[in-house]
Image: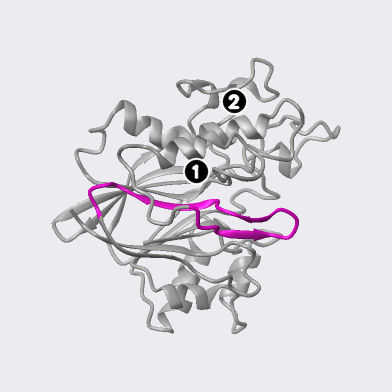
Amino acid sequence: MAAWHGDFSRKGPGLLVKELTSDKPVPGLDAIIDANPDILLLTNFDYDASLVALTALQTRLSQHDVRFPYLFSERPNTGMPTGVDIDGDGRKGGPRDAQGFGYFSGQGGQAILSRYPLHLVQDKTALLWQDVQGGSIAADDPVGADQRLSSSAHWAIEVGVGNDKLMLLTLAATPPVFDGPEDRNGRRNRDEVLLWPNILSSKPDIFDGAPVILMGNFNLDPERGDGLRQAATNVLQHPALQDPLPSQPTVLWDRVGEMRVTYVLPDRSFVVSAAQVMPPSPDAGPHRLVWVDLALP
């Protein structure tokens, strides 16, 4: 089981497809090959409606005997126009004016590659921020009633492993920076990070007893950096989840140093046999792949 905010996003639509279908080396491919997980969540992967890029990655990996017969992705909120000048630069339609940061629709979305069948059970991607119980959207938010909570996506994905089932709960939260004293991104980040844990607390049987794995890019460290860090602490202390890699940094930023922002947090009923934050992958961004070996309860 692995999650990675590797750099599989490009500056325009179709560029990732062009790269993956060429004969050129793909930055980051070696990290996936070395980890060789049964299930991989990528949280910075350009979406296209026919999953051409994801299928091309699947093909490139199969050439190294790393096979993922099952793929999943849906259009994220990244790059989706709001029609509002959110960042106040006097223009509409910029990357920071979208539902989630993006120069084009689908830039830097989420994608799953798996050796087991995948089935979307719940999709909270279109959930409005104002409809989040306990949410912190401001009364004068520039997008108001049209603002979605997810900057990328929130999926509940059922995985069939033989006669057993488990549930992946995914997210890729907005960075809690690049705003002003109103702390819009910080508040949104907190609400994104807490969405699935709060659902687990209020409705513990919502997935019919299937053990869950909360995984993705929180863009939030419980101990350092910007953001409402208590949210990350609350998730790590959730009674239904366990933390196989406490305090392990997953990214190295040039200015702020090491931070932990990518998480794979399995249900406490799983037996964890191993876990690792892999070394940085050259030319694939500052984030590191995180994997956890699990045995079903």
Residue 12 is one of the magenta-drawn residues: no
Q: Secondary structure at mark 2?
A: helix
Q: Is residue 236 left or right of residue 159?
A: right
**Three-letter code, disc 1:** Ala
Residue found farthest to the top? 139
Q: Position of residue 243 (x, y in %)?
A: 38, 50
Q: Is residue 181 left or right of residue 258?
A: right
Q: Is residue 149 visible?
A: no
User: In the picture shown, does residue 73 fall above or below 66?
Assistant: above
Q: Position of residue 90 (x, y in %)?
A: 86, 32
Q: Secondary structure at mark 1?
A: loop
Alpha carbon of mark 2 to alpha carbon of mark 1: how far? 16 Å
2 and 1 marks in contact (CB < 8 Å): no
Residue 146 is labelled as: 2
User: In the picture shown, does residue 251 fall above or below 196?
Assistant: below
For image coordinates 45% across by 35% down, the residue present is: 234
Residue 269 is one of the magenta-drawn residues: yes
Q: Position of residue 27 (x, y in %)?
A: 60, 74
For image coordinates 41% across by 44% down, the residue present is: 155
**Within 10 Å of the Cα at label 1, are there few (<14), some (14-19), or many (20+) other Cα atoms?**
many
**Three-letter code, disc 2:** Asp
Of the residues tagged 2 and 1, which is closer to the observer? 1
For image coordinates 60% across by 28% down, the residue present is: 147
Residue 153 is labelled as: 1
User: In the picture shown, does residue 189 fall above or below 182?
Assistant: below
For image coordinates 67% across by 22% down, the residue present is: 141
User: Which range is magenta?
Assistant: 247-270
Q: Is residue 98 visible?
A: yes
